[in-house]
Amino acid sequence: MPMRAPGHPGQAPIDDSMEEPKMASKAQINRIIRTTENKLASVQRRELGHLTGAERRAILRHTTVGAIQVGRGKGHGRADSRAERIWGEAETRLRAELQAARSLLQQQTTQAATAKVTKRAESRWW
């Protein structure tokens, strides 16, 4: 593990090692997929619980603005469309996370199968 001196006095040494990140187990990836699917279903039901803080604040802000506009006798269309856009963006974000987790699981399965075939080919016991 090569280390070099810090850039400034009192700073921790900088780790230059290029270690491969540990792969998550299949169980961990499956758990991530399940939780992400649950979050996506929650967002599709328009529940605020699984939105990020920024998304939640924006939804509440646009809902409040729409209510104020209705109270003033004006239309609420713009506030509704902005809130719908945020819901759509949240769905897109969760779908992308779900796709990434599924592709990681597929990649691990392919690597395991390749390793198994390679091991069998190298054994030459027949």
Image (cartoon, rainbow, N blue to C red):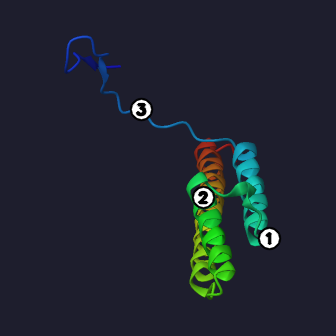
Q: As shown in the figure, which amino acid type bears the numbered disc 3?
A: Glu
Given residues 23 and 76, the one toward you in this image is: 76
Within the image, what quadrant is residue 103 found in?
Answer: bottom right
Would residue 45 be visible to someone looking at this image? yes
Q: As shown in the figure, which amino acid type bears the numbered disc 2?
A: Arg
Q: As shown in the figure, which amino acid type bears the numbered disc 1?
A: Arg
Given residues 4 and 121, the one toward you in this image is: 4
Q: Check disc 2 and report the residue beneath it.
A: 57
Q: Check disc 3 and report the residue beneath it.
A: 19
Q: Reading the chain from its start, which is encountered first: label 1 or label 3?
A: 3
Given residues 4 and 19, the one toward you in this image is: 4
Task: Give the number of the mark in front: 1 or 3.
Answer: 1
Callout 1 touching callout 3 (CB < 8 Å): no
Residue 45: numbered disc: 1
The correct choice, above or below, for 36 with respect to 64 in the image is above
Q: Which secondary structure lies at badge 2?
A: helix
Residue at the spot 64% in from the left edge and 74% down from the top edge: 68
Measure the alpha-carbon separation of dots 2 and 3: 39 Å
Residue at the spot 68% in from the left edge and 79% down from the top edge: 71
Q: Which secondary structure lies at badge 1?
A: loop
Task: Give the number of the mark in front: 2 or 3.
Answer: 2
Measure the alpha-carbon separation of dots 1 and 3: 42 Å
